[in-house]
Image (tube, rainbow, N blue to C red):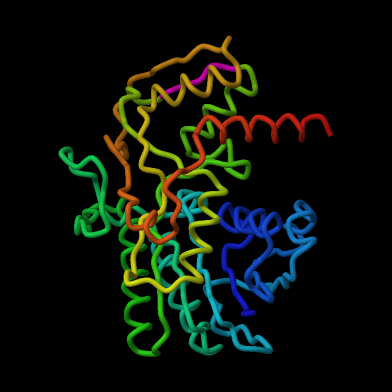
Amino acid sequence: MSTLLVTGGTGFFGKALLRHWKSTGSPFKKIFILSRNPESFLKKHPDLTAELNVEFIQGDILEASTIELNKNIDYVLHAATDSTIGPSLGRLDGFNQIVKGTEEVLKLAVNHHCKRFLLTSSGAVYGPQPQDMDKIPESYLGSPDPADPNSAYGLGKRSAEHLCALYSQQYGFSYVVARCFAFVGVDLPLDAHFAIGNFIKNALEDSEIVIKGKGDDVRSYMGQGDLARSLESLLINETKYNVFNVGSDKGYRINDIALLVRDIINPTVDIIVQGKKLSNSKSSYIPDISRLAEMTHQSVLSPLEYEIKLIQKSYLNKKSV
């Protein structure tokens, strides 16, 4: 069995994988997780690593290439820059963290003779989804506007993807890019900038569900378990493609998501539609996942209703402790 290094292993993606491997068993002999504060994570989540052969390495992705490990690393999963952290940074700092952090992790992968590198990128690399396009395929070559500072996240991810291609060609390891869209699960922050998380929090706390925009934008959500299975497959299976969309292709209007959350969790709360014009609003944000379904043989995804109920159950269990 082989070894794996994970950056971002204490975030939403990392927790998804740890929960998955705790349930099914890990395909890796040993898992190294790079974290700036391992003690804090282990204190909050001692159960997630209890049955796995996990070793935490304290460090920062911006200095990852300086980290010395005692053995070679067969696989690297770089997931340290996600959309939860990004908005808390300035545009320039966020861009630099994505690009410089990715190159540092690529250098570390080279230093430890990595065989396969997985980058978690984003659907933001495509820029706005065209009005006449139902689902975005990997072959679509759209791009965020480079003259718009708000494009820093998407353009940073595009640059990170290109770095993977360059390092793969230069040093001979294989690589794959997971262009991730939107997700839902028990580890989703309910007080961040994710609409569905905010709706769930409002319903759980018996307060109004507030839709800031008009509510007619369309979104889709892949469950945390499906995300973990997808990333694992992309890590360990050889494919003819380097890029895969990862997400759900079942779209919901924001208004309908709010109604679904309310009806499942708290039918008595009101839904308020403020109707504001949001500068970062996308009319649709739906991936074509036929390439992923073919590779993973995973054509049926967990229903959104099921994921909402899991979050409700997790919230109530924590509250009762």
Quadrant in the picture for the C terminus: top right
Counting from the top left corner in percent of width and height, residue 11 is at 60, 55
Q: Is 47 left, or right, of 86 in this rendering?
A: right
Q: Is 316 left, or right, of 163 in this rendering?
A: right
Compared with residue 236, is residue 184 higher up or lower down, i.e. above or below?
Answer: above
Compared with residue 161, is residue 40 higher up or lower down, i.e. above or below?
Answer: above
Magenta region includes residue 65: no
Counting from the top left corner in percent of width and height, residue 257 is at 44, 26
Q: Residue at x 71, y 57 (%)?
A: 22
User: Which residue is at the far front?
Assistant: 297
User: Which residue is at the far left?
Assistant: 132
Compared with residue 79, is residue 195 higher up or lower down, i.e. above or below?
Answer: above
Q: Residue at x 51, y 52 (%)?
A: 227
* Image-quadrant location for residue 129: top left
Q: Nearer the viewer, residue 99 or 129?
A: 129
Helix, strand or loop for the magenta stretch, by majority: strand
For residue 67, say whether it is visible.
yes
Q: Nearer the viewer, residue 39 or 174?
A: 174
Q: How many marks?
A: 0
Counting from the top left corner in percent of width and height, residue 316 is at 73, 29
* Image-quadrant location for residue 95: bottom left
Compared with residue 203, is residue 174 higher up or lower down, i.e. above or below?
Answer: below
Q: Residue at x 57, y 12 (%)?
A: 267
Magenta region includes residue 210: yes
Range of residues picked out in magenta:
207-211
